[in-house]
Amino acid sequence: MIKIMADSTCDLSQDILDKYDISIAPLTVTMNGKSYRDRVDITADEFYSMMENLETPPTTGMPSPSSYLDIMKEAKDKGMEEILCICMSSGTSGAYQSAVLAKDYFYEEFPGSNVKIHVVDSTCMSHVSGWLLMKSAMLREKGASFQELIDFNEAYKRNVKHFLTVDDLNHLLRSGRLSSASALIGKMLKLKPIMSMKDTKGAIVAKERGRKKVLTHYVEEFKKRNDENLTAFVIIGYTTDKSYAENLKAKFLQETSFTGDIYIMQMGVAVGTHVGPGGLSMFFMETGDRKDNLLLNEWEALIAKKDAFLDKFGLKKINKSHQKERILP
């Protein structure tokens, strides 16, 4: 039997963790000078409730190597000889490095052990690693070997598509995930930034005005990007407003031909620290190697505005392909 483990930023619901016997090493969150272990000392709902009254933003800490090591040792004691650990992006946290240290400590403590351990850097966080964990567990149930699970994760981890939006820009501003200028413009225009992962770190890839347009953006991007052969399920994440996630699920069912499972799960304390109340995310497997390009998105919008002006006054339109080739690298 192959043991599957992760850190608590995977944000999988407890019933999924129990169903697939996935163990997690908890991150810590510090508020008002007191530290809590994610999902051990504090729940997501308790965290979001406490956030409303904080004078200073909460901070998070990576799981200790010992918390990973304890899970590895327990798996060994149960007779498991293969352990797959999927961690949040090494570009946003030290959780991956902590798991690698735990692996080294394991072999120092058991130098003759035949237990095989592989640690995956998911290059993302929240339900991206959660998506990989669930898919790995499903493949394990179908008889996939340990090496096959490793190959799947390393080959496809960058194809799990992640979109995230927020209601309150202040949380992203305080955490350094958004510039003050972008936050000011967003507030004035009531724009909601849509983020994804680029080079293992979060980046704004689009902006929409209002929740309805956010939902439309998500669904349209899914239609363009979804890999029908690999997306067995979709995960929709939320921080505090479950109805927001339910509205996205309803729109999926109405406007796409997707027939797989759609899971709604709450984002935990690590993501919530930066996202805050009202966050909404979506995760699925995209085709090929499509790239988000904020510059291209903004240039296309600018061209559309210019074309509208030229049309109104009967002038010649801009040659889009020529302009893109000249401006974009």
Image (cartoon, rainbow, N blue to C red):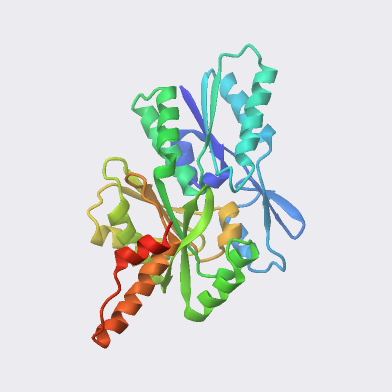
Q: Is residue 324 left or right of residue 31?
A: left
Percent from the top left, x then y, of residue 182?
A: 55, 71
- Residue 125 lies, with reference to residue 177, above or below; the image says above
Q: Is residue 171 left or right of residue 18?
A: right
Q: Residue furthest right?
A: 33
The answer to which quarter of the image holds residue 194 is bottom left
The answer to which quarter of the image holds residue 59 is bottom right
Number of numbered discs present?
Answer: 0
Q: Residue furthest top?
A: 112
- Residue 10 lies, with reference to residue 46, above or below; the image says above
Q: Nearer the viewer, residue 208 or 112?
A: 208
Q: Is residue 244 left or right of residue 98?
A: left
User: Measuring 52% from the left and 18% from the top, which residue is drawn there?
Assistant: 81
User: Measuring 35% from the left and 24% from the top, which residue is drawn there?
Assistant: 143
Q: Nearer the viewer, residue 280 or 297?
A: 297
Percent from the top left, x then y, of residue 309?
A: 31, 83
User: Measuring 62% from the left and 48% from the top, which residue is drawn there?
Assistant: 38
Q: Is residue 302 left or right of residue 43?
A: left
- Residue 202 lies, with reference to residue 313, above or below; the image says above
Percent from the top left, x then y, of residue 44?
A: 57, 55
Q: Can residue 219 be seen here?
A: yes
Q: Nearer the viewer, residue 290 or 28?
A: 290
Q: Can residue 46 be seen here?
A: no
User: Measuring 42% from the left and 39% from the top, which residue is drawn there?
Assistant: 134
Percent from the top left, x then y, of residue 290?
A: 36, 50
Say which quadrant the C terminus sits in: bottom left
